Image (tube, rainbow, N blue to C red):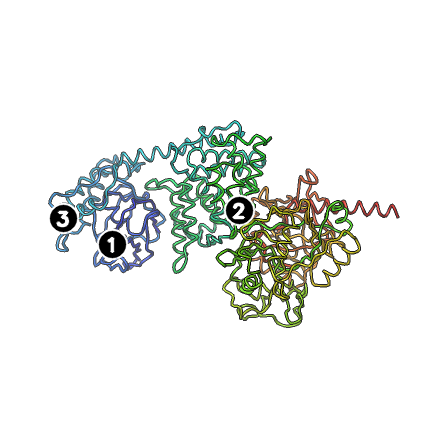
Amino acid sequence: MPKISGTTPNVIARTKLVLYSCSASGHLRTEKHLEVIGTPVGCLPRMLGGGWSVVTGGCRRSYAWYPVQRADCPEQPRRPRILSIPGQAPISLPRLHFPSFSLLITRAYSPTPISLSRNPRPLHPSPNPTAMSSSRPSAFDALMSGARAAAKKKAQSSSSPRKRKSPDPKPSQNPNPTTTSETEPTAQENGDASANAVASQEVVAPPAAKKACTATSAQERTALLKSKIAELKRKAADFDPKLIDCWKDGEKVPFLFLCLAFDLIDKETGRIVITDIVCNTLRTVMHTTPDDLAAVVYLAANRIAPAHEGLELGIGDASIIKALAEACGCSEAQVKKQYKELGDLGLVAKASRSSQTMMRKPVPLTVAKVFDTFRLIAKESGKDSQEKKKNHIKALLVAATDCEPQYLIRLLQAKLRIGLAEQTLLAALGQAAVYSERHLNPPPKIQSPLEEAVKIVKQVYSVLPVYDKIIPALLSDGVWNLPKTCNFTPGVPVGPMLAKPTKGVSEIVQKFQDTEYTCEYKYDGERAQIHYLEDGSVEIYSRNAERNTGKFPDVVAAVSRLKKSSVTSFVLDCELVAYDRQKQKILPFQWNLAKGVIYGHNKTPVKSEYKDYQKINAFTLILITRARKNVAVSDIKVEVCIYAFDLLYLDGRPLIQEELKVRRECLYESFEEEAGFFQFATAITSNDIEEIQKFLDAAVDASCEGLIIKTLNKDATYEPSKRSLNWLKLKKDYMDSIGDSLDLVPIAAFHGRGKRTGVYGAFLLACYDSNNEEFQSICKIGTGFSEAVLEERSASLRSKVIPKPKSYYRYAETISPDVWFEPTEVWEVKAADLTISPVHRAATGIIDPDKGISLRFPRLVRVREDKAPEQASSSEQVADMYSAQSRNHSNNQDDSEDD
């Protein structure tokens, strides 16, 4: 069916375009309501009235315009006058002032598109306007008169009556003058001059020459920008922002500039080069438009707000596909077909938009426009919110050019995947601040300004992960004053400090032999950070900075009741653990589902996938028996106890730079314990191997995972978002296996055979490399599954199948899975040990320059619903575990030799 493409001026005209098709019997059928791409519904008729042309795609078509009474309920015309347009001859339409119009297509489902173009010489209204009357000839007489005149002149100028002249390559710039001259008097004779007058008052079109000049300058700037973008690859010390800025100081940063920078990054693999590109990009923005720096950084981080705000776009691929189809004038089926072929919606968008011709060049996108629209999309809610979101996306896609559609889609999907890790972005931001002219002189004590600036920015972001606060402070006061202007703030969660695994008590004693340390129970629950603010409000955040306050009303009540009256504000680091208050003990680490049916928060039986496991993690009970928000205390079925082990903030005083001994004393002095509601983590301070071993056994008997060992006085500050060697974790099962379990992502599968026909027989698992933003294969897992579990996992992943592997999957060419998956699930896996592998790519280049690391005899422990794929075990963790295993094997060999 013909489509209408193009953009229009932003005029206020409450009209609607309705597309009809005409069947062989002559009956009209409503096909769809249309809007001109990039403009509100209703602008098209008035726009056409301003001297626009209708041009068909190469063969004769018949169209009719006729007035209707209501835009929302168009009436069928009695006898519409048909306008025949021969070939590509442009037909000028007079200005019309009806409240609504419809386009009648006499040849249904024609694949030829209609394009709209601007006449350089608009029509002039008659000085004697009169009202349009139904007794007078309609405006279609004028249209038909113009059409006949055009056809007649074309036939006279043709050398052969059987041959048609080649179409005018630029009909919009060279409209048929005969058509215009013929149409104007006819329109005046038929009383349509009043319509012309009304339209000319409502729509003031800028001169065509001025438009052409603007379009040319925009095209020239785009070409200039593309020719200069490679300058971003210069070494930061040799780069001058003036080399590349193609916009005036203070003018909004073109979105194309950022997209071209993304393109450069995507083609690089070296961390140093990528850092230079990002640094130079940020320096250019700081030089020209510093107000846009925050938006540039947020988009480069593929975010629209800090994580704790919970502001998400809330759109899926289905909505994006629909918006893309409407923006590009094609069907959803076509978009899905291309998506299946290319495997990347961003590439589909780029290909679709590059092949589409535009009637009028849209206003170029800016970074600020894109970022503001993204936030607007995220805030849409209520009735028709998905439709509104789709329209916002469509408007962006229509204005996008070159590689902009590709990165618009990827940003909307939150899958930028160009190999730009956030730590690299922070490093580039620190370097860019040093190179900026206003803050060139570092304090005299600093030996390496670049390294110190990077360290400062990363440290500040770890305690205040909010770019809206960091970047204005960076621009106004400089990087050297950043720690003074950006501090730990209650209400803004920091990333939790994490522990590294160890395999035995003797290793702990050896590592901490000259240091005082403490051992705490390692509880099996959900890590939580509780913020109590001075106004009495409480916020609870997960380890991923997700707000969980509505999920734990019992926790909110407990901390408010059990804090001491003198305490006005605090930030507590703790574990929320499933607890049986009747028996006064922690629920077992494993819960046997054979004891009975467990019912979820909506009073339905527990998810079937958990039934397939003989036992599940105790805290999983909480996850499946509580809603995500607005939980009522009366509906709570599994109670929790708060086990507090650290205090990060107290009464206006940040404590993260204090030693653990000081923080613990503040913790003990600020709260009252109550069994089953609020308790301090059980701890001892000892360096005796036998005593620590007994303490470990007691922890396991108390349904805990093991121990956490922490330094007390030396190197004992709190290190947000860091897996520190000053905290070690020891589990009972570490001593019989590789140590800690691994959280891995299934990225592919192999079809089952024999008894496993109909399900997947094995899965390809991968760890995550955050530096390169890629998933690296680590093992195949196919044993240890019960039939029920295998069926459950197969059914869950069938809906995640993609046509080909993602560009950010790393695996050997010798691996040929039958299906590939979107990275969506995280599986906790145990194994006998780790080994160097020529096949798998995990941690390639860290232990061995050419080979990766693989797991031997892996088995599935559980599905980690609390983790996103990007939070899977990293390649660095895999390498650390391999190194620890090698050291342990070496020690064992030494011991046996001594024996």
Cα distance in 3D space between marks 3 and 1: 20 Å
Does the rendering let one see residue 302?
A: yes
Discs 1/2, front: 2
Q: Earlier in the sequence, mark 3 or mark 2?
A: 3
Q: In this view, does 888 lie to the left or right of 656?
A: right
Tag on residue 464? 2
Q: Mark 1 points at which residue?
A: 100
Per the rendering, the mark at residue 190 is: 3
Amino acid type at mark 2: Leu
Q: Is residue 282 above or below residue 73?
A: above
- In the displayed structure, does residue 798 sit left or right of residue 703? left
Q: Where is residue 515 in the image (x, y as percent from the top left)?
A: 73, 46
SS assignment at label 1: loop
Marks 3 and 2 sit apart, C-alpha to C-alpha, by: 71 Å
Residue in the foreground of this view, choosing between 438 and 316? 438
Local SS, label 3: loop
Residue 351: % across, % down: 45, 43
With 21 as the anchor, is 576 left or right in this view? right
